[in-house]
Amino acid sequence: MAKMDQIREEANFANGDDQLKVASERLHLLYKQSAPASFLSLVNSLFVVWLLWGQVPEVAIIWWMLAIGFSSLMRVVLFVAYYRMPSDHRHIKDWQLPYAVSLLINGAVWGIGSLLLVQDAGLAYQMGTYFFLMGMSAGAISVYSSIRWLALATIYLLLLPMTLAFFMSGETLQIIMALGCTTFMLSVLRSSKVLSDKLNSSFFLALHLQKEKDTSETGRLKAEQAVAARGEFVASISHEIRTPLMAILGLTELLKEQKQSSESRMLVNSLSESGGQLSSLVNNVLDFSKIDEGELELHARPFSLSSVLRSIESIFAEPAKAKGLHLELIIDGISNDYWYGDEQRIRQIVINIVGNALKYTEQGEVVIEAQVRPRNGGVVIAVTDTGVGISQSKLGQVFEAYHQLSEGQVEVQSSTGLGLSIAQSLARAMGGDILLASQVNHGSRFQVELPLAPCSEASYMAVIEPETQSRVALHGVSLLIAEDTLLTQKLISMFLDSSGAEITFVDNGKQALLALQDNTYDVVIMDVQMPIMGGMQALQAMHAWQLDKGQTLVPVILQTADNRAETKKRALAIGAVKFLAKPYNKQSLLEAIGFAVLAGQQMQSRRGANEAEELAVLQDDFLAAVSVESKCIGQALQDQDLATAKYHAHNLKGYAGLFQQQQLLQLSTALEDACENPQGIGVALTHVADINTWLSHQ
């Protein structure tokens, strides 16, 4: 971070040469995205035509389509001319102005043209078109962020005409939508500034490192810093997109709960599906960045393979039915249903493959089949489809990042081409692989082979049962929520509207700390990144103040659009009871608050009991629990079952922290770390012996 700050400082005083190079890189990035952006503009226009055909004059639709085609063609022509021109002859002023004109024309045709097109159409069709323009605007933030003013101009051209029309309509629903969109447009001002600054810093950093590499042998180390800067940039993009995305998904979820006409329901469902796809895209980009940087983490625990596959079948049942496809799940070949592995990553692998199969299959079936590996143990999950198939010459390209089937094989689909690449990387990270067999016009078979270790149903239930929380009534529960984004405040308020909870909102961590010192709250929810004082700093200050006053710690839930594993680990390490990654839905929020309420009640009940009697009883329970966990760990290590040993070591660490036994906490932490290493059984057994020695002295 210090290096990034230094580069940002130097960027403000860079010479004209450096400024020109960075401006050239910004323009190059803009042109690089122009071809796919133009194609998506045409695809999106076809959706609008399909939506409005028969509702507005056909001549108007045709003229509007011609205008869209003309503006898109302008950008394609510029794209071709730009890449044919030698790089040293690409003068910025000569190429930026024509592209800006073509993009602004396209934005005006979409924004003003759409308004004129639907002004006489029904309310449902006006809403549908408006939602569609909002979705396009969300994508424009990242696509055109290399030149901020151009991104802002495009977004406002898309949304402002219809927003003004909705404000002047006098219709309550339209005015509410226009207010939400106005809030979104205001948030874009800040988001685009952050993205533009991050991008500018990244380009200057890359330029700085190139100079260092040319003049010094430390170039390799500087290049690693560039990779870190790219990771920071990707995380920043994710954070800035997730916040408005949460608003879009949350408002869509609330709209689904409202009584609507069939047309409106169809439009809301389309919006929900598009928002889900955008969320999946952001997650894929982040996963690919982690894999590329070698930072991917796997978390093995007992899981039920049949439960995972049945949930995936339910996810794709409706999409398959909508395409007229037969989706079948075959799990008869599983002799054992319980395994140790990273359940979420395995789910991600299969979802990516099944989603890909459905995308390229127009008739027939998609079959998901699971069986135990005949050699070396583990499981095989095969996905077979009757789709277009892949030629033998292109089989090796399927798992390449950003690769898609060519136009000659199948109708082009809009996606990143990261799904299969990520799936293969995840499978290999688990020690397995994905095999592919395919024939053109006869379908494909993706076979995921994972060398998982089997476990018992008892081990699985030991993990699942503690996670099963009964529903907690929130009526009368006092909540303090620190969130700096007004739209997110409104969304959370609407999520909790019918819960009966008493809600107090503040704008930053410092205000939350002051509010907690003056009032009593059952649960505190704080965003991690806020002005003046962030959530993590505020949480630590709250706990320090409460401990100093001899008060019971209030349960704190931290939420953020930064869903990196290291952020979650830090949040839980400093005392948060739950971590919510944006975008989250209403159910996730209610479950997190319910969990926090239970945690608070347990702490209060322990505090309210007779202290001397409680300590005597709990101390006996504590030592008994330590003894049981120690025996389980020792047996698991003798069986060379590191996953089970790590699970019980984690439980032991939790007991030690709860009862403030520092020596035991250090021993159990070292034991858990030793269980991460397949060669660490000897070290782990030593730690178990030390724990038993500690236990004998209690």
Image: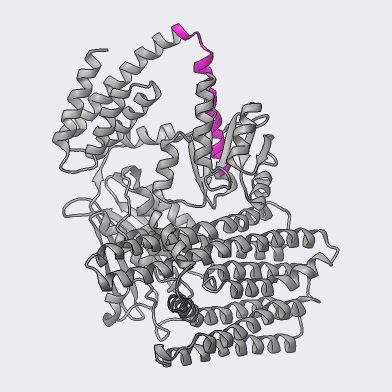
- Comparing 541 with 311, the one in front is 541
For image coordinates 68% across by 55% down, the residue present is 255
Q: Main secondary structure of the magenta part?
A: helix
For image coordinates 36% across by 80% down, the residue present is 441
In the rendering, at what x and y percent does residue 523 appear?
A: 58, 32
Q: Is residue 552 left or right of residue 638?
A: right
Answer with the quarter of the image where residue 263 lies.
bottom right
Q: Is residue 323 above or below residue 83?
A: above
In the rendering, at what x and y percent does residue 288 appear?
A: 37, 62
Q: Is residue 328 visible?
A: no
Q: Is residue 587 left or right of residue 637?
A: right
Quarter of the image with the C terminus in it: top left
Quarter of the image with the N terminus in it: bottom left
- Which segment is the magenta one? 589-612
- Comparing 611 with 532, the one in front is 532
Q: Quick check: is 599 in the magenta stretch?
A: yes
Q: Quick check: is 132 in the magenta stretch?
A: no
In the rendering, at what x and y percent does residue 371 appear?
A: 27, 54
- Comparing 281 with 200, the one in front is 200
Q: Is residue 43 left or right of residue 432?
A: right
In the rendering, at what x and y percent does residue 689 appear?
A: 17, 24
